[in-house]
Image (cartoon, grey):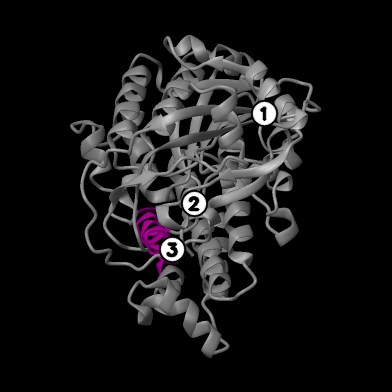
């Protein structure tokens, strides 16, 4: 073992605190989060029970003690809006969380329709029920995919509130209609024929902006759905090109949505954001930057400053994960092999050997925090036999402010099995583009 490796092991071991014995393990992170406006919590896969459970436990502490007023997740706006209405006691009050999550039907449903999310939402609803309506914590979707669902929501809002503007919405809808609600057919068509629906959805957004009231949840929902329609149209057109620009469109949209939620809820609130490590960890500390890619964590830091943003990543050595062999396939419980010895996961396994919290603190010049090594990222599409491509070169101390570490993991437990998706959906890396 080289002296350099000895230094890395010693440094990582010195930073680690046991992630056991209840929620007191999160005390350092709760303290670090105080006074920040955005706390982004990542995950190294979309199918690991421990990642979801740790995230839920930490978020509950932040909601109860840290003044968190909203949670934004890597999910679609219309689906998460239904959760928000339920979790704040506004709609579907006869259901429990599992009943609400049964409405998630876009593949991969296990990302949100799983037992860990259901348990968290039930607890959040109970917490909210003890508070005045104005003090309850909301739940919102940050993602860009919901083109048709968002258009349908806009038409419903206009039909009820501004029926004279329905022809404009109908024109946007009819522009997409020939593609049978398949955004990829639409996107590929724009490559063959130099025409798009961009003008129609931009005009619709402009009209909705002019017609919404200055505030109010319904108006905010309408405006966000109109924005999603514009950004989704742009995203799908970019996705069929080879310049990987769709990734940047998507992460800018997530950051813009977080800013809109924060502005809507007021200047004193704090938001917790849930997304994959590849979105949460600052892209400038990885090889993503050299590929021209940015991400949510980077944008939060650039827009709001490091003092207002806390980025928390996750990692694990081995275990199991819920994922699919190919896009649109049914989920499986898969083995996750032991991490590469030269990766950050390999270092943490040898240095710590048990679940731990590593809060980085102010000094980011320490040996392990400045060490460049691979950091495993598992998406919703995964092949354990081809693991070598799942490592993102990373400088941990620049990518995150803290890390949650696990040795052995269990697969996430879906509430229901996947059905054949009725709307084809493709995503940028790390989840199977």
Find residue 143 and name its label.
Answer: 2
Observer-side mark, 2 or 3, equals 2
Give the Cα distance between marks 3 and 1: 34 Å
Q: Residue at x 48, y 35 (%)?
A: 317
In the rendered image, which quarter contains the N terminus? top right
Please state the horizontal and vertical placement of residue 145, each as a whole percent of the image. 45, 59
Q: Residue at x 29, y 42 (%)?
A: 113
Residue under pointer 3: 147
Give the Cα distance between marks 1 and 2: 24 Å
Q: Name the foreground residue: 270 vs 135.
A: 270
Q: Is residue 391 left or right of residue 181?
A: right
Please state the horizontal and vertical placement of residue 132, each as a whole percent of the image. 40, 17
The reply to whether the C-beta atoms of the residues labelled 3 and 1 are less than 8 Å apart is no
Label 2, secondary structure: give it.
loop
Residue 155: within the magenta?
yes
Q: Name the foreground residue: 11 vs 247.
A: 11
The reply to whether the C-beta atoms of the residues labelled 1 and 2 are less than 8 Å apart is no
The reply to whether the C-beta atoms of the residues labelled 2 and 3 are less than 8 Å apart is no
**Magenta stretch in the rendered image:** 146-166
Give the Cα distance between marks 2 and 3: 11 Å
Tell me where residue 248 sits by quadrant.
bottom right
Please state the horizontal and vertical placement of residue 426, each as a whole percent of the image. 44, 65
Find residue 293 and name its label.
Answer: none
Res 203 seen here? no
Q: Earlier in the sequence, mark 1 or mark 2?
A: 2
Tell me where residue 165 sits by quadrant.
bottom left
Observer-side mark, 1 or 2, equals 1
Find residue 401 and name its label.
Answer: 1
Label 1, secondary structure: give it.
loop
Residue 324: within the magenta?
no
């Amino acid at each position: 073992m080289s002296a350099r490796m000895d230094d890395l092991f010693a440094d990582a071991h010195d930073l680690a605190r046991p992630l056991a014995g209840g929620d007191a393990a999160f005390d350092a992170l709760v303290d670090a989060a105080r006074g920040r406006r955005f706390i982004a919590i990542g995950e190294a896969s979309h199918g690991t029970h421990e990642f979801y459970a740790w995230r839920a436990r930490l978020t509950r502490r932040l909601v109860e003690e840290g003044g968190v007023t909203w949670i934004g997740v890597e999910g679609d706006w219309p689906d998460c809006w239904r959760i928000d209405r339920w979790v704040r006691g506004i709609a579907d009050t006869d259901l429990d969380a599992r009943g609400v999550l049964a409405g998630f039907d876009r593949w991969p449903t296990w990302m949100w329709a799983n037992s860990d999310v259901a348990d968290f939402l039930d607890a959040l609803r109970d917490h909210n029920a003890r508070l005045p309506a104005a003090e309850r914590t909301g739940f919102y979707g940050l993602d860009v995919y919901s083109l048709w669902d968002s258009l349908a929501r806009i038409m419903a809002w206009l039909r009820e509130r501004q029926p004279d503007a329905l022809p404009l919405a109908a024109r946007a809808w009819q522009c997409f209609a020939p593609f049978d609600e398949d955004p990829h057919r639409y996107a590929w068509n724009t490559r063959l024929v130099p025409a798009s629906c961009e003008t129609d959805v931009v005009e619709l957004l402009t009209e909705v902006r002019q017609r919404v009231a200055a505030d109010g949840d319904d108006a905010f929902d309408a405006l966000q759905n109109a924005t999603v329609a514009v950004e989704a149209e742009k995203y799908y057109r970019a996705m069929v090109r080879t310049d990987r620009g769709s990734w940047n469109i998507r992460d800018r949209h997530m950051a813009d949505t977080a800013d809109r939620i924060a502005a809507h809820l007021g200047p004193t609130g704090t938001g917790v954001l849930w997304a994959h490590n590849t979105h949460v960890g600052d892209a400038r500390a990885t090889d993503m930057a050299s590929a021209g890619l940015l991400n949510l964590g980077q944008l939060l830091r650039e827009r709001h400053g490091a003092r207002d943003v806390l980025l928390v990543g996750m990692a694990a050595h081995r275990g199991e994960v819920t994922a699919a062999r190919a896009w649109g396939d049914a989920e499986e419980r898969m083995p996750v092999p032991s991490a590469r010895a030269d990766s950050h996961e390999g270092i943490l396994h040898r240095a710590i050997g048990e679940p731990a919290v590593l809060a980085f603190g102010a000094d980011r010049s320490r040996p392990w925090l400045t060490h460049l090594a691979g950091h495993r990222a598992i998406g919703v599409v995964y092949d354990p036999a081809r693991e070598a491509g799942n490592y993102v070169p990373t400088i941990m101390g620049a990518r995150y402010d803290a890390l949650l570490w696990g040795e052995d993991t269990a697969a996430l437990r879906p509430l229901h099995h996947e059905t054949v998706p009725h709307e084809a959906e493709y995503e940028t890396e790390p989840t199977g583009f």
